[in-house]
Amino acid sequence: MRAAGSRGRAHGASRPLAKASIVGGDGASISNFPFQVALYDPRAGSPAAGFFCGGVIIDATHVLTAAHCVTGAGRSENATNVEVLAGSTSLAASEPTAVRDPVASSTFDSHYNPITSDYDIALLTLTRPLWSGATPSINGLDAIAPLPLEPQASAGAANPNRSPAIIATSSGWGDTDPSPGHPANYPTDLRSVHLPLVSDAQCEEQYATIEQPITERMICAGGGRSHVDTCYGDSGGPLVVDSESPAHPPFDYVLAGLVDFGNGCAQAGYAGVYTRVANGQIMGFVSSGIGHTIGPVGTLAKHRKHKKRHRHRH
C-alpha cells in the first residue's frame, strides 16, 4: 500500500509514497472480497514475485486502482507489463478460480497531483472480460465479482463525521510489519482489517503536523491505539463499508475508498488516507473515463512494490 522511501519537497517535508500491506489484520478468503485484484509485472515470473499494488473490479473489463500505481515521475511503459490476478486468495498458489488478465490500457485522473496525492485514482481496461454471461454477485461464494459503484450509498454509509465511528474494512497483500526500516514482510495470502473512519477535521489536524493537505477527495480510517492499518503494497485496494443495518457482509459492501497514503504504517496519531470514491469529482472521472491514458508502469511499479503512499515525518 505505501511506498518505501521518500521524495523531498518544500519546507523540509517528504511526500507520501505508496503503501504496502495489512498490519494487525487477519487472513481472508477471496470469496469475501471477490472484487479484489492484485496488480503484478508478469516479467517477474509470477504474481507473487511481480506484485506491486491492489485494485477493485467494477465491471467485467475495468478495475479501479490508485494513480500512483500506474504512473510516476512522468515515465510510462507498455501496458503489457502489467496484469491483474483475480479470483485468488493466494499470490503463490494456482487456484482453480484464478484468472490472469493483461491490462490493455490505463487512464488516470488528469488532475492527479503526485506531490499532494490529490485525485489519486486510475481506471484500468483489461484485455478480455473477467467473466461471460450473467454478472456474478458478492455472495460469499463467487471468487470474482464486481463491486458496484454507488456514490450516494457510499456517502451515507461511509460518513466519517458520524458518531460513533463507522467501521470500515480493507483488504490486500501488503506489508504486515509497521516498524520503520524493517525488512519487508509481504504475505502471499490475502488479509483484511477493520478500521474506524476518522472525521475530516481530525484527519486534517493530524496531517497538518507534517504539512500534508487532506482534501475533500480523501477519506481517512484507522490511526488509533489498536495499531491496525493498511501498509506498503496495499495501494489501490478497497476500503469498504456495510450499507445495511444490521450489517450483512460481504453482501452489502459498498466502496468507500482506495488505499492511498499515510505517515508510515499503523503509527499512533495518524490515520491512513484513502481516495474518497463518493466524491463527485472522483466519480466524474470514473464515469467518463476521460484522463491521461498511458501504459501501466511495469519496471517503476516493481520498484514501488508493496507500498501504500505514505510520508515520513522528519
Image: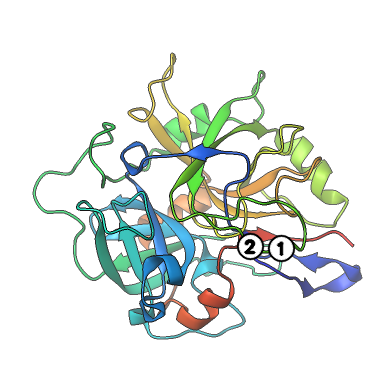
The mark found on residue 184 in the picture is 2
Q: Is residue 63 above or below residue 45?
A: above
In the rendered structure, the answer to whether residue 209 lies left or right of residue 52 reads right
The mark found on residue 131 in the picture is none
Of residues 84 and 252, the one drawn nearer to the viewer in this rendering: 84
Q: Where is residue 154 in the image (x, y as percent from the top left)?
A: 47, 34
Q: Is residue 314 above or below residue 24?
A: below
What's the amino acid at mark 1?
Pro
Of residues 211 and 195, the one drawn nearer to the viewer in this rendering: 195
Q: Can residue 68 be seen in this view?
A: yes
- Place residue 1 in its image quadrant: bottom right
Q: Where is residue 293 in the image (x, y as percent from the top left)?
A: 41, 76
In the rendered structure, the answer to whether residue 273 lies left or right of residue 125 reads right
Q: How many numbered discs sit on the rendered protein?
A: 2
For numbered disc 1, what is the local secondary structure? loop
- Place residue 183 in its image quadrant: bottom right
Mark 1 lies on residue: 16
